[in-house]
Image: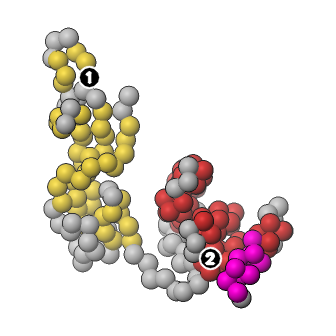
């Protein structure tokens, strides 16, 4: 069985992962699988892959847009943060509901696995793809888990502003009150 994942930096060619003025480019392994068993060819890797430490590795070049950097095989855009305010990601134009659903589902799975920073990134991606107010609640929960409490309050307040009569209204207000008490405000 093959799994797609960014798992290994093979060769950095432009930026070494640092922010650049031009596109960031890096070769990364996108697929690692055991060699296919074949009676004729022995342990052969599929076309386009090479053998590395007994595993077949497929390599692809990732090019990031200007102003972003490559981190763990993903393009990341640095955003200036205002203390206490959650910085909403720039929305896609046009919105992509299908991509938003995919990223939202990924974010929920990551959250349930306890990977809060990765879940936050996926949920922010969902919000950027199609800014649906309920995603703000989940972003707030991730921010809270990460200890970014002022930003969590901001995300929760944005959620309440966008959906004042939600099924989560009371729970969200309770969360905000509890966090504010923790912050002493």
> The C terminus appears in which quarter of the rendering?
bottom right
Return the residue at label 2: 149
Considering the numbered disc 2 on the image, is that residue within a helix, a strand or a loop? helix
**In the figure, residue 138 lies in which quadrant?**
bottom right
| Image location (x, y in percent) of residue 121 | 49, 63
Secondary structure character of the magenta stretch overall: helix
Q: Is residue 165 visible?
A: yes
Residue at horizontal 30 percent and vertical 38 percent from the top? 32
| Image location (x, y in percent) of residue 165 | 84, 68
Residue most extreme to the top? 39
* Image: magenta residue range: 175-184
| Image location (x, y in percent) of residue 8 | 27, 49
Q: Is residue 48 above or below residue 126?
A: above
Rendered image: mark on residue 36: 1
Q: Is residue 21 magenta?
A: no
Whether pointer 2 and pointer 1 mark residues with C-beta atoms closer than 8 Å, the reply is no
Residue at horizontal 19 percent and vertical 51 percent from the top? 10
Mark 1 is surrounded, within 10 Å at the Cα level, by few (under 14), some (14 to 19) or many (20 or more) other residues, namely some
| Image location (x, y in percent) of residue 68 | 33, 71
């Amino acid at each position: 069985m093959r799994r797609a994942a960014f798992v290994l930096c093979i060769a950095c060619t432009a930026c070494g992962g640092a922010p650049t003025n031009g596109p960031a480019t890096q070769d990364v392994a996108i697929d690692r699988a055991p060699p296919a068993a074949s009676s004729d060819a022995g342990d052969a890797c599929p076309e386009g892959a090479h053998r590395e430490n007994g595993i077949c590795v497929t390599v692809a070049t990732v090019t990031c847009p200007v102003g972003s950097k490559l981190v763990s095989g993903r393009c990341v855009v640095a955003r200036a943060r205002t203390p206490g305010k959650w910085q909403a990601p720039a929305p896609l134009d046009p919105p992509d509901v299908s991509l938003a659903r995919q990223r939202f589902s990924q974010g929920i799975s990551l959250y349930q696995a306890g990977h809060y920073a990765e879940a936050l990134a996926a949920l922010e991606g969902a919000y950027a793809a199609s800014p649906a107010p309920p995603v703000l609640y989940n972003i707030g929960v991730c921010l809270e888990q990460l200890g970014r409490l002022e930003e969590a309050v901001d995300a929760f307040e944005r959620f309440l502003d966008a959906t004042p009569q939600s099924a989560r209204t009371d729970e969200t207000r309770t969360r905000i009150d509890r966090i504010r008490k923790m912050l002493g405000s």
